[in-house]
Image: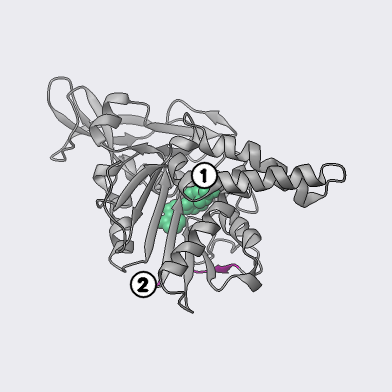
Amino acid sequence: MERFDAYMERCLYGADGFYRTAGTAGRRRGDFITSPEVGPLFGAVLASALDAWWDDAGQPDDWAVYDVGCGPNALLKAIRRARPMEERPWRLVGIDRVHGGADGSTPPSPDRGIERAVELPDDLSNAVVVANELLDNMPFRIIEHSASGEWFEIHVDNGVERRCGTEARLDIPAGTRAPRLEQADRWCHSVIERQPARLLVFDYGATTTARLARRGGWLRTYQSHRRGTDPLYEPGRWDITTDIAVDQLPAPHRVMDQRRFLIEAGIEGLVDEGREHWKAHAHRPDITAMMMRSRVSEADALLDPDGLGSWLVLEWGTSLATTRP
Ligand SMILES: C[S@@+](CC[C@H](N)C(=O)[O-])C[C@H]1O[C@@H](n2cnc3c(N)ncnc32)[C@H](O)[C@@H]1O
């Protein structure tokens, strides 16, 4: 019998786990689309924000951007496209526990201008750390507050769920369950302790665990664009993921939805630029013109209030003022 987080660890990152077997180049077989996978616009917006933060920090020579849980580098490639090496005074570094090569996994083929590291350095004072859809994929425990007021923790025993009595508690109503995000919390703490100029987390979730528990549906599985029903079905063949609860993480300096973040970071200007470029080149379109035109539909997806636009953006950093979500 194993606790749910140990089961999830095995299903996603074990020798036959979902992330180890999902395609030769480390690509998941289109199981779901993340913001950088929508197209290059997300990275272009982030590149503008990175420029501004580098300026705010006094333009240090040794500035670096780390993408943790970078997968096959979709975000870093988009940033590189928006800010080619010659124009960009900062390093781009990808870290991924599966595609890093440190544990015997196949390292990704080198991408010009994008470094790979196994872990973050101890001093992050001249660095921005980005994690897009990382925390939801970190193994979590599941705690149940039963209708009769007892507390249980979910275990898995040969493909069957077992509820075991527990001392663990979450702030959730009776008759509900919720994830306990210990690993995600530890990871955030370990980054914040190294005092990054900024830690930027994009993920789906809610501000409180109670809200997640009441709403339900926070535990999901995916395979080839299909939503599964049961995380115990076909272990290792499905991605397992949870909505995150902000109140289980170190208190962020700023919380907002992705829509607002991207608008503040200038997405609308980039879309207008794309429209104008397309108008000027539509009679003889090349790749750049096509990319510029696609900004319009990419923005629709990234800002969708019922989709990616509702993802949470959490920010930590010494220079940030606290705002309410
Ligand atoms: C849902 S994918 C997101 C990929 C990419 N960030 C994107 O937005 O397309 C989550 C990635 O996080 C990686 N991952 C999970 N736990 C990790 C950890 N502790 N450190 C680094 N990478 C991790 C997985 O291997 C996987 O590639």
Is residue 113 rendered to the left or right of residue 167? right
Q: Which residue lies at the image location 52% right of the left edge and 67% below the top edge?
A: 93
Question: Answer yes or no: do the residues labelled 2 and 1 have beta carbons within 8 Å?
Answer: no
Q: Quadrant of residue 129?
A: bottom left
Callout 2 amino acid: Ser
Given residues 217 and 17, the one toward you in this image is: 217
Q: Which residue lies at the image location 38% right of the left edge and 61% below the top edge?
A: 198
Residue 123 counted in the magenta span? yes
Q: Which residue lies at the image location 19% right of the left edge and 31% below the top edge?
A: 172
Q: Is residue 218 visible?
A: yes
Q: Which residue lies at the image location 40% right of the left edge and 51% below the top edge?
A: 201
Image coords of residue 169 (percent x, y):
16, 38
Dot 1: within a 10 Å radius of its alpha carbon, few (fewer than 14), some, or many (20 or more) residues? many
Question: How far separated are the C-alphas under marks 2 and 1?
Answer: 34 Å
Question: Disc number at residue 125?
Answer: 2
Q: Earlier in the sequence, mark 2 or mark 1?
A: 1
Image coords of residue 225 (percent x, y):
58, 32
Cβ of mark 2 under 8 Å from ligand 1: the answer is no
The image shows residue 101, relative to residue 237, as above or below, that is below
The number of discs equals 2
Overall secondary structure of the magenta stretch? loop
Given residues 55 and 62, the one toward you in this image is: 55
Frontmost of labels 2 and 1 is: 2
Indicate the quadrant containing the N terminus: top left, top right, bottom left or bottom right: top left
Q: Secondary structure at mark 1?
A: helix
Span highlighted in magenta in the image: 114-124
Is residue 223 rendered to the left or right of residue 128? right
Q: Secondary structure at mark 2?
A: loop
Q: Which residue is mark 1?
A: 18
Image coords of residue 301 (percent x, y):
57, 35
